[in-house]
Image (cartoon, coloured by chain):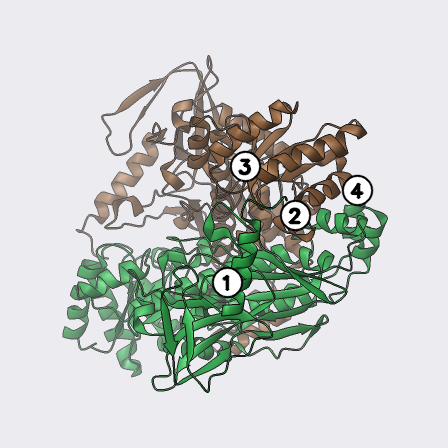
Chain colours: A brown, B green
Amino acid sequence: MDKNKERNLSLLADFYEFTMANGYLMKNMENKVAYFDLFFRNIPDNGGFAICCGLESCISYLKNLSFTEEDVKYFKSKNIFSDKFIDFIRNFKLEADIWAVPEGSVVFPGEPLITVRAKCIEAQILETMLLLLINHQSLIATKASRIVRASKGRAVMEFGSRRAQGADAANFGARSAYIAGCIGSANTLADRDFKVPALGTMAHSWVQMFDSELEAFKAYAETFPDSTVLLVDTYDTLRSGVPNAIKTFDEVLKPMGIRPKGIRLDSGDIAYLSKQARKMLDDAGYEDVQITASSSLDEYKIMDLLMQGAKLDSFGVGERLITSKSSPVFGGVYKLVATEEDGKIENKIKISENVEKITTPGFKTFYRLYDKNTGKAEADLITFKDEKIDDSKDLEIFHPIHTWKRKTISNFTAREMMVKIFDKGNLVYKLPSLEEVKKYTESELDSMWEEVKRFEFPHQYIVDLSQSVWDEKTKMLNERNYKKKY
Amino acid sequence: MDKNKERNLSLLADFYEFTMANGYLMKNMENKVAYFDLFFRNIPDNGGFAICCGLESCISYLKNLSFTEEDVKYFKSKNIFSDKFIDFIRNFKLEADIWAVPEGSVVFPGEPLITVRAKCIEAQILETMLLLLINHQSLIATKASRIVRASKGRAVMEFGSRRAQGADAANFGARSAYIAGCIGSANTLADRDFKVPALGTMAHSWVQMFDSELEAFKAYAETFPDSTVLLVDTYDTLRSGVPNAIKTFDEVLKPMGIRPKGIRLDSGDIAYLSKQARKMLDDAGYEDVQITASSSLDEYKIMDLLMQGAKLDSFGVGERLITSKSSPVFGGVYKLVATEEDGKIENKIKISENVEKITTPGFKTFYRLYDKNTGKAEADLITFKDEKIDDSKDLEIFHPIHTWKRKTISNFTAREMMVKIFDKGNLVYKLPSLEEVKKYTESELDSMWEEVKRFEFPHQYIVDLSQSVWDEKTKMLNERNYKKKY
């Protein structure tokens, strides 16, 4: 699990994180405490929600964050870093307080996924890696969940390693896809390291390596009688592949008393071929033999195949999952929301001509409000950390921009979504197992209305600000409103 | 450079590579030699060419390929691998012959980028990592080259780490972008490990950390007088940011006798803001101070900004470069093209109902034909490895599908593009330095006509098959033509 520790990724940070830390030190601001929120603004593929993944990797990174003598040498070679900075780097030890939503949580734009409270010099240098890990893994989990939902109960296998954007993308992508509902991955390393079940059939090269397709199929069935899935499209799916597969089942597996597992279609008109292949298999007495499809699949192609009545039992999904091809960026950001000096917290805001880039100030958390009758999530409410939600009585919430849009929530339970992960640099969170994260993700999805989960114009789930947060944000915006001297 | 060696990525392979290797061993086929071609079918973003990157990573992976006792234990735990396979894995030592195009080469669909000649059990297990590395790094180099070309001589900086698909995507993406023409990266690790120059300015958090924007700017200029680039959009670009920047230049840098470097625009209407900011800077006597833009840029946005007359001197490009957002998959494949037993080579083909998925059989190489007068590349010719091109006389080449399209090349030089990298498992290739690769890439681009480099409907560069290769492919297709028993 902790494979990150073998690598020194402490320098995987934007160079400006270090120059800014150096600047804070030079200005004797190192004891100023900063609060940073990690949040995102847009849901990939215009979906209704995202699945937050990457926390385990963040914890691994944070636990092992330190700088080697090689790093120190590197900074010195730049000739712009002060001795004070070099000392800081050499003696670096995580001291931050960090809160986060559990891995596998359903999350929405604007919600803090991670909040870091630390000396500004420390909080600043965590930015790049926390963003990179959460952005990548949330992206893949969110995409995989869409593909799994489109498959309507059929198994989805992650087959994308060869098209992943680097080795980490393959490994952590496989893990994120598994969390989001895939049954396993072709990536062997993800099995060894994370216990994501390794899956696979055969390549075209296996078939080509033999003098004939039939010989190749028979050799495979003899070698792996209990897991025989034959790839039938090397030469001609219906005239050669499927007949040879049936012949192999008859001549190799039947005498052994073993039922074959399936065939795989990897090219051509999958809808048509699957129907024809299904009929041929059924006619030969192999009604239980499954048909797997692969070939640039994603949620849209799978929905379309199923709409056409394709006879498919499972899907191997590659490049379009492992890169989230139709929406390959998860745009998480890491923004300063408050500072603290001598125990006094000062809220901070970033204003922008792009209104959606304006930040929400203050040290915050957020609650999910569940209807007690249905168990479904009705709304999220972003509050200051020290606000309490009283779920014993009705609660009126309102839209943060169209404030006349009001809703009274009654008969609900409020659940705080963020949990403490690090306390003064010490890990205080018990990491769940991968299977626990996968189960949790499933329960998170179950708590969402179908309207939020659809692909086209999903219902916009309510994420409101508490009255106090809204008041503070409005006050700060008005103060800044082009009147004040900067 | 060789950071991969610290990691055991030998299991980053599709599970079926190992089950197939096991199968070959069970069938006593382990001495059968396989020839695999790694090639791609489509150019990202419908461009005119791709830049092949990733060879250095492939070499690092191959040199360090071996299996640990942990790996052996893993395979044993699966209960499907034979003792013979376990022995093979435990004693694995690379024995392959491998040819490849140098890193930074301009390449086209169908051309072998890597050819592996090895025992089938060995060649098979290299598939996933070779594809992953070449696919990812070629993708980013190809995208970065487009963005650099759109910038028309202005500097492009790679700023995407935080949105990269994992840590490797950030590191090797920074390296690939640099090879393709970026001047550096924000990623500090890529500087330490690869010597990609680290670049950066300041974040909004720096500005927010101080009581006022002016104070923040002055503190920065005092700390880094020689590299002052101020981010001017935290509150209000024209009413606050630019005036405060000018004030800082006047009050902090001018007395020191230092010329400021620049300002950065990160939101709002960059075209408009850049023109206004340029005027304000010019009026204040800072005609030489540069304006940098960042904010979800790519080649299209940059072309559009320049068309509008935006006053920009350099670009910081993030998520759309580091994920190749508009086209995030490089579809390289690894296909069996021949086998060899007792010294006899047998060519192999994969047929498909998707015509573009049909492979070109045989042990091959390819030549680039340059016009002696212009120095420009006129066409590529894929040949069998043992064919020789006589460039002392005219050469007639023809389109591999529309065979009536013929062209006579005269007064040319022929350059074989593939070089030998491994001989019987030993590295026989001298790796060029990063700077040499970058220079080579530049010369590769210089050798291409502008028509091939344009974005919209680029000229389709000629990639033909030699008569012998064409004859063999046609013969094999006709033999397979639904007549033969498979």
How far apart are labels 3 and 4 at the CA level?
28 Å
Of residues B391 and B95, the one drawn nearer to the viewer in this rendering: B391
How far apart are labels 2 and 4 at the CA level?
27 Å
Tell me: residue A367, above or below residue A351. above
How far apart are labels 1 and 3 at the CA level?
28 Å
Q: Which disc is residue A293 wearing?
A: 3
Crowding around mark 3 (Cα neighbors within 10 Å: few <14, some 14 to 19, many 20+) is: many
Crowding around mark 2 (Cα neighbors within 10 Å: few <14, some 14 to 19, many 20+) is: many
Which chain is home to disc 1?
B
Amino acid beneath label 2: Val
- Residue with the most extreme front position: B483
Amino acid beneath label 3: Ala
Looking at the rendered structure, whether the residues under marks 1 and 3 are on a common chain is answered as no
Counting residues from the N terminus, which is met first, the one under dot 3 or under dot 2?
2
Q: Where is residue B131 in the image (x, y as percent from the top left)?
A: 57, 58
Counting residues from the N terminus, which is met first, the one under dot 1 or under dot 4?
4
Which of discs 1 and 2 lies nearer the camera? The answer is 2
How far apart are labels 3 and 2 at the CA level?
18 Å
Q: Which disc is residue A207 wearing?
A: 2
* Residue matched to label 4: B77
Amino acid beneath label 1: Gln
Crowding around mark 4 (Cα neighbors within 10 Å: few <14, some 14 to 19, many 20+) is: few
Residue found 24% across the figure and 65% down from its top: B244
Which of discs 3 and 2 lies nearer the camera? The answer is 2
Query: Marks 2 and 3: in contact by CB < 8 Å?
Result: no
